[in-house]
Image: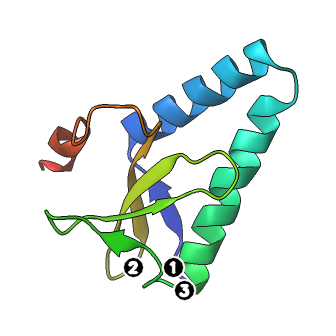
Amino acid sequence: MKPVAYHPAAHAELEAEISYCESERPGAGVRVRADVAATLARVREFPGLGRRDHQGWQHIVTRRCHYVVHYELLRDEIVVWAVADPAREPGYWLSRRQL
């Protein structure tokens, strides 16, 4: 299975969301982290599981917390470009992909 690598901004937004959820309700941050980890474990096991959007990016919605994980399958790894609340503006993270 391919390893998962987070873009630094995607990792930062996930950690910020975990902190926020934990501050609002103790234990919620742990559930968010577990939900995202379980989702990415499924993607690692079944790489074709996510859907492609109209721009060709892959994404999957977590089961419990309903975050949208935007990712790319590369030859040697899975790159997570964003872990987004579904209320976020679509495509806000696309500039992260520019090399």
Identify the amino acid type marked 2: Asp
Residue 69, position as x, y percentages in the image = 46, 54
Residue that mark 2 sits on: 76
Q: Report which residue position mark 3 lands on.
A: 46
Examine the rendered structure and indicate whether residue 44 appears above or below residue 29: below
Q: Which class describes the residues within 10 Å of circle 2: few (<14), some (14-19), or many (20+)? A: few
Quadrant hosting residue 26: top right
> Would you call the spot at circle 3 few (<14 residues within 10 Å), some (14-19), or many (20 or more)?
few
Mark 1 / mark 3, whichever is N-terminal: 1
Q: Tell me what residue is drawn at x 80 percent, y 38 percent.
A: 30
Residues at circles 3 and 2 in contact by the CB criterion of under 8 Å: no
Dot 3 falls on a residue whose secondary structure is loop
Instruction: Answer whether labels 2 and 1 touch (C-beta < 8 Å).
Output: yes
Q: Residue furthest right?
A: 26
Q: Residue type at mark 1: give it.
A: Lys
* Identity of the residue drawn at 39% across and 61% down: 79
Tell me the element at label 1. loop
Q: Is residue 99 left or right of residue 44?
A: left
Horizontally, residue 94 falls left or right of residue 81, namely: left
The structure residue drawn at horizontal position 59% and vertical position 56%, both measured from the top left corner, is 62
Name the element at disc 2.
loop
Residue 49, image x, y percentages = 48, 80
Residue for point 58% across, 48% down: 66
- The kind of residue on which mark 3 rests is Phe
Disc 1 and disc 3 in contact, CB within 8 angstroms: no
**On residue 82, which mark appears?**
none
- Tag of residue 2: 1
Q: Earlier in the sequence, mark 3 or mark 2?
A: 3
The percent coordinates of residue 98 (x first, y second) are 12, 48
Q: CA distance from mark 3 to mark 2?
A: 15 Å
Give the alpha-carbon distance from disc 2 to disc 1, as whole Å. Answer: 6 Å
Instruction: Work out whether mark 2 precedes mark 1 in sequence or the reverse, and give the earlier one.
Output: 1
